[in-house]
Image (spheres, coloured by chain):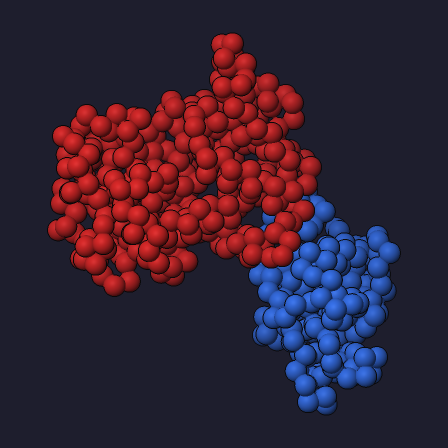
Amino acid sequence: MKHLLSMADLDRAEIEDLLDLADQFGEVLGRDIPKVPTLRGATVATLFFEASTRTRLSFERAAKALSADVMTFAPGTSSVTKGESLKDTALTVRAMGADLLVVRHEAAGAANRVASWVDCPVVNAGDGAHQHPTQGLLDCLTIRRRFGKLENLRIGIVGDIRNSRVARSNIDAFTALGAIVTLIAPPTLLPQDLTDFPVSVSYSLDDVLPDLDVVYLLRVQLERGSGPVFPSLHEYVERYGIDRRRLDALPPDAVVMHPGPMNRGVEITPEVADHPRSLILDQVSNGVATRMAVLFRLLSRASEEGRQ
Amino acid sequence: MPQLMDGADVRRAIRRIAHEISERHKGADNLVLVGIHTRGLPLAEAIAEAIAEFEHAKVPVGELDIGLYRDDIGHRPTARLGRTLMPIDLTDRTVVLVDDVLFTGRTIRAGLDAISDLGRPAAVELAVLVDRGHRQLPIRADYVGKNVPTSLEERVTVRVEAIDREQGVWIERTGE
């Protein structure tokens, strides 16, 4: 693994290796002093060309828990406002001594382009509607910690599949580990061509709820234009929102997940979001351990190749 | 491959180390044995069992993986990490670190750093099955199963029953 750009870069053994490592890092994060000196001297740069709270903070927390230094970049206050290109920005940050770049960008393929320009590892932290691989990994970790495994678990992904990079990464990740995935959405929020996806599809959440172990809710992406494709938010909530009644329709051990940020009252009611069967905050804390595993694997490999 | 210690020799060395530890500390109170992955852990458990036989008290055994504290990350392929698990708070206790072979001292240096992140023990001591010399750091063992003069071209291999289904210490020449 030289970069982490897409879940498709990882085979099952590599995914499981990263999840095992993340379990070890979870132990580190639970200590009184949640920090190890492993990546002392390495510098991680976060290049986020698109808004983010949890992903950027999570990568920074992960880097710092491994004793790496962090350089951070926000387009609003940078030379991007003067027209500096993605390429020049990436090369500049690399030239300043960054050993690994974490890239988020609204354009699909942006992280792949950056990886072709720089001679250091690149992690894709979300590129348009394409991929968000660390989200897929942290969700697998969260499910594995709850159920012990993903093999044969029935996972329903609900909502705006068409515009969601989380859906793409998570379909790859869940199916790679043997889960049975159903996409649940109105036809207007599904990709036009589903032939490449090893999944089944349902338009009715209520039909499939009793057969799910995990309900994975996607955010209604009002800023990406989910709005006009269904008649009203009210109708979406009626058909695809999770409330107490739908929670009770699930099998007793089933759980609810959401990548955040939530639209409380749209995809999920506050009561369900804060319910013990909601794993939303577990996802957030597992995200730090997962990103520690990714940084550790990429940076220990990179310097190994550099020195031998 | 020439054998330095057979299974019975290893058992006797473990029993002697167990007696030395309880003699120095006048019993087993306030002790924690911490085995360094991989083969320090079963040795620590064996020492704890031996102490239990004559002190009638079970010394807690922790396990420590020093992978995250190595000073050669990037020089060598990263091995799988083991588990770090302390059954008890180390603060104000006497920790006896246990490893199979003491060589350069770098593993123990990493182990000391890892211990200090987990708590503040009253004291840390070191028990090893084999001391083969060639220290690169100012570190020495408090309890030694066997001192073995070696050359740098030799490799010392320890096998323990719990992991390898046989027990003993072997030495072989490498380098050619």
A281 relative to B129, above or below:
above
- At x 46%, y 38%, the residue is A54
Q: Nearer the viewer, residue B31 or B20?
A: B31
Q: Quadrant of the N terminus of chain B?
A: bottom right
Vertical placement of A255 versus A159: above or below? below
Residue drawn where x is 49% and y is 19% of the image: A76
Q: Nearer the viewer, residue A276 or A283?
A: A276
Q: Quadrant of residue B27?
A: bottom right
Chain B tint in image: blue
Q: Position of residue A148 (x, y in %)?
A: 38, 61
Residue A10 or residue A52, whichever sits in front: A52
Q: Position of residue A182 (x, y in %)?
A: 21, 46
Residue drawn at (60%, 23%) of the image: A94
Asked if residue B76 can be seen in this view, the reply is no
Residue with the most extreme top position: A82
Identified at 71% across, 66% down, the residue is: B91
Left or right: A233 as drawn, with respect to B141: left
Q: How many marks?
A: 0
Question: In the shown orientation, is residue A9 left or right of residue A152?
Answer: right
The red-coloured chain is labelled A
Along the horizontal axis of the image, is B90 left or right of A31? Answer: right
Residue A72 appears left or right of A227: right
- Can residue A163 be seen? yes
Residue A209 appears at what percent x and percent y?
18, 53
Q: Position of residue B113 (x, y in %)?
A: 73, 55
Is A165 above or below relative to B32? above
